[in-house]
Image (tube, helix red, strand yellow):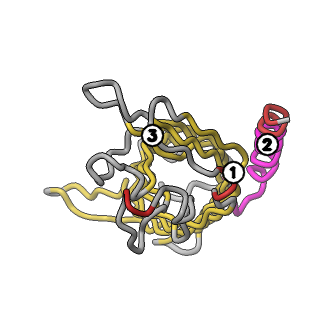
Amino acid sequence: MKKFTEAAFFVLLLVVAGGIANAQRFRAGLTLGATATDIDGMDTRDQDNDFNKLGYTLGGIINTKLNEKNDLQVEINYIKKGTMQLPDSNNNGYYKLALDYIEVPFILRHHVKFNMGKMEVKKFDWELGLSVGRLVNSSWERGNYLYDIDMSKINTTDVSFLLGLSYSFSSNIGLNFRYSNSVIPAVKHDVIPGYLITYYYNTGNNMVFQIALKFTFGGSAAKE
C-alpha cells in the first residue's frame, strides 16, 4: 500500500506539472534534493542537534510572478525527516526515527539585485514560507538504545516555517538552500522519559536543512 501511494503521488505530480506548464501565467517544474534532519531534544547523549539523519526530497513546483520583485510559489513534496543518534565508542546508544511526509509549502520569493563592481548580479532569491505536511510513513530502529518510544504519539500533521536562498544558473535551472523548523512537535513531549531531557519550546520539533536542484519550464521566465 505504501509503495502504491508513493507511485500514485509521483504520477499525479508529473501530470499536474505538465498541464500547468502550458498556462501562460505560470511556470511549473520539478525539484530533487537531499536533507539533513533532526528532532530537537531527542539527543540523550549530549543534548545538542547533530543532523545525522540523511534523506531526500522529491516534488513539483508551481510558480507565478506577482510583480517585478516577487513570485508566489507552491510546491508538493515527498520529504524524509526524522532523527538519528550514532553509536558511541562502545557501540551503544544507536537509534533512528524515520518520518516521511507529503508536504505543501507556500512560499514568497523575492528577487535580489546588487552590484559587484560594474556588473549587476540578479541571480539570487531569498524565500520565506509556511509548509503543511501529512505523515505517510514512520519507523523506529532502537539498536541497543535503552528506551523504546510509543509510535502512537507521533503527530501526523507537520506545520513548519521555512527560510531559504536560491541561485539561478539559468531561467530553468536553480540551486536552493532551505532551513525549516516545525511549529508543532513531531513527537509529543512524553515520548521519551522526562528525566532524560529538558523540555522547552522547541523540544520535539522537526528541523530540516535541505539542498535541492529545481528545474522549471513553461510560461514566461520569472527572471530574464
Whether residue 197 appears in this view of the structure is yes
Q: Nearer the viewer, mark 2 or mark 1?
A: 1
Q: Which mark is residue 102?
A: 1
- First in residue order: circle 2 vs circle 1: 2
Q: Nearer the viewer, mark 3 or mark 1?
A: 3
Q: Is residue 161 left or right of residue 91?
A: right
Q: Nearer the viewer, residue 180 or 170?
A: 180
The Cα atoms of the two marked residues, 3 and 1, are separated by: 31 Å
Q: Does the residue at mark 2 contact the one at mark 1 (Cβ under 8 Å)?
A: yes
Residue 192 in magenta stretch:
no
Q: Is residue 3 left or right of residue 183?
A: right
Residue assigned mark 3: 146
What amino acid type is highlighted by mark number 1?
Ile
Residue 62 image position (x, y, % from top left):
67, 56
What amino acid type is highlighted by mark number 2?
Phe
What amino acid type is highlighted by mark number 3?
Leu
At x 34% / y 24%, what residue is drawn? 91
Q: Is residue 90 left or right of residue 68?
A: left
Q: SS for tag 2? A: helix
Residue assigned mark 2: 9
Disc 3 crowd rating (10 Å Cα; few below 14, some 14-19, many 20+) is: few
Q: Nearer the viewer, residue 106 or 151?
A: 151
Residue 35 image position (x, y, % from top left):
47, 42
